[in-house]
Image: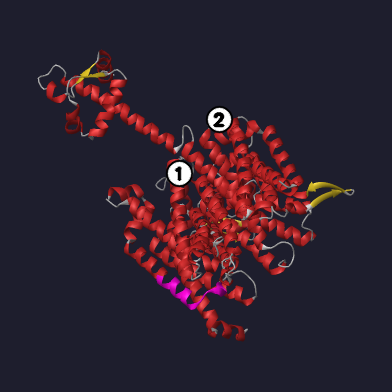
Amino acid sequence: MSGLDFEIQLLAVVVSVACALPGVFLVLRRMALLSDAISHSILLGIVLAFFWVQDLNSPILILAAAATGLLMVAMVEALHATRRVKEDAAIALVFPALFSLAVLLISRYAGNVHLDVDAVLLGEIAFAPFRRLEVGGHDLGPRSLWMMGGILALNLLFLMAFYKELKVSTFDAGLAAAMGFSPVLIQYAFMGLVSVTAVGAFDAVGSILVVALMIAPPASARLLTDRLPLMIGLSALLAAVSAVSGFWIARGLDASIAGSMATAAGLVFLLSMLLAPDRGVVASLLRRRRQKVSFARLMLTIHLLNHEHSPAAAEENRLGHLSAHLRWSPDFARQVADRAERDGFLDRGEGDRLHLTPLGREAARHFMTR
Amino acid sequence: MLEALQVFLFDYTFRTVALGAAALGAVAGALGCFAVLRRQSLLGDAIAHAALPGIGLAFLLTGSRATPVLVLGAALAGWIGTLAVMGIVRGARLPEDTALGIVLSVFFGFGLVILTFVQRLPLASQAGLETFLWGQAATLMAADVQMIIIVGAGALALLALFWKEFKVLTFDGAFAASLGVPVRRVEFLLTSLLVVAIVLGLQTVGVVLMSALVVAPAAAARQWVDSLGLMVLLAAGLGALAGVVGVGFSSAGSGIPTGPVIVLVASAIVGISLLAAPGRGLLAEVVRQRRVGRRIRADAVLADLYALAMQHEDRRYGHPVATLRAMRRGEVGIERSLETLGEQGWARELRPGSWGLTPEGEKRARTRFLDPDEEPS
């Protein structure tokens, strides 16, 4: 692995983790799509600030971009507050307009500088290591690594300093207000953080894939745990895994790194959705299946109890009869009977007669008198 | 100016492209109404982004860049994206916005991976796939426009055919189910029509911004009318307008992507509608509030005049404005309220600066503020 590859992967991991941290709260606060809206809107701030300072590396660009992100959120809220459009429509109206304006300005007035519309969508993580940060002739590494590292540190600091406020306002906004935290202040501080993070990540992976990095790892983590601290840790871990595996997918296929990172994040989510221990699709199917057999086992004991000692018992309490009486397929009937026998609820008699054990009788009575 | 107009009206290429953009805007506007009313404005965004890998894969698999092939691929991918959103919401029990965000960004990322393969092909025919990102109306051929019109007309015909079902589903899904409407299937059809409207526009407007053309005309039309039928017609008209004007602007300058221009025109239409629509418009609201405020202030002065008249032997006696102002605690605009009362014939300026109640004013004050049958003491 060359130094270049290492630097790209390191940057990919830093970007992904920096995005995943605020992403946790975006997912929990049901504001996932505001990340989409913010990551599009910040382009207008970048473009306008670029026209002003004529320098793509100026920190003013970041400030202007973050300000546009907040402006967009304020515009959405104002539009929603007029009660003329619903909130989802307000989002869908505001950010395309700001983004269109930005793209138009770029293609009209900045087409020949280093700010083109493809970079807006794709980012340039593969080229990031070529832009070095040099201080007094010493090479300190890629410039964007320093910037994203700073943003990651900022996110960590914010999370540690305002963990309690974020947590309470996310899960119980009313309680947060009653405890004296201003929900509006927290909301805008958090949105500002999302905007700054999006600006930094934008440079590396483009405006749309930022959304994948912010939403997919926290959504995967959400499926794996119900505890917030664990969810934050898992989000960061899965983000890093997506970044590194995305890089190697891209290397293997010789494809876009940013696109592969998003694809890897999607695959991680798909795996979590299928295999999560409690909320996963496979786990739910197994649980449902288990519940079905367990319920059927109880049905069987009740059926046997009903006909026990009755003249019809010889006819009713046979494995072969269950298909007719309980409308079970012969396979399912055998499976249920096996399960009940294993659990000590019944014994097999001669032929396919089924006899309740004292334990099975007890279970059936207990259920019916419950 | 006239010359430019002539070019616009008679230039064959421009007419073709404008016709396509208009048809597209009309279809997107009409179907967008249902997305907006059902609070699915952002589903369109997810569908449009999810269509990208479909375009790339259709090209890789068939080697053809004929528009119908690519649009079919886009439709399939957009449709799978919709199913994925539903699958995540139902299967993983995550909120819908999270599901939309994941599908939108992951499908798009995958699409970019596919596009890097496409770009590596040694074919000259690969050129043009990037137009699907930002939209380039200039690439519309007569055959493309024909396809937009035929497929769009088919979608609108289905909309007309299932109008009643779509309408009841949009406003009251539970009621629809109780009527025996197969809700799942109707929902599926409506969403499929939305997918069709979106993929038709990808070549002209691009995957990044197509959702705005779905939402904006509908949101604008909603401000002007209160009936679904009128809203759909108006949204179709406004969508067509945005398409034609947007194409006009973008063909005026070279190298301007069409998508952003159309979206900006559509956004301007929304802005105008929000401000100027009668009834729901914000300006109408301001006018209404001012009128109500004026009436309340005039009523307050009328009440004061009545109180003064009741304490005076001569009920028609003129009272100085200064007295009235003092009774309103120095509030400004007493003169304006008095003028309003004068216009109504409820008060009269008897001497300069002195106003008295007219018989009509006294009657009005009594019916408005007191029991009308009660005689003044």
Say if the magenta span includes residue B149.
yes
Q: Position of residue A84 (x, y in %)?
A: 51, 55
Asked if residue A56 is positioned above or below residue A168 in the image, the reply reads below
Left or right: residue A133 compared with residue A356 = right
Asked whether the residues under marks 2 and 1 belong to the same chain, the reply is no
Residue type beneath disc 2: Arg
Where in the figure is residue A103, as x and y percent of width and height? 65, 63
- Viewer can see residue B316: no
Task: Assign the C terminus of chain A to one quadrant of the image.
Answer: top left
Q: CA distance from mark 2 to mark 1?
A: 20 Å
Circle 1 SS class: helix
Q: Amino acid at mark 1?
A: Val
**Dividing the picture into quarters, in which one does residue B264 lie?**
bottom right
Badge number at residue B89? 1
Q: Which residues are magenta?
A: B137-150
Numbered circles on residues, count? 2
* Vertical placement of residue A258 versus A330, above or below: below
**Residue topped by disc 2:** A227
Mark 2 residue crowding within 10 angstroms, few (<14) / some (14–19) / many (20+): few
Q: Main secondary structure of the magenta part?
A: helix
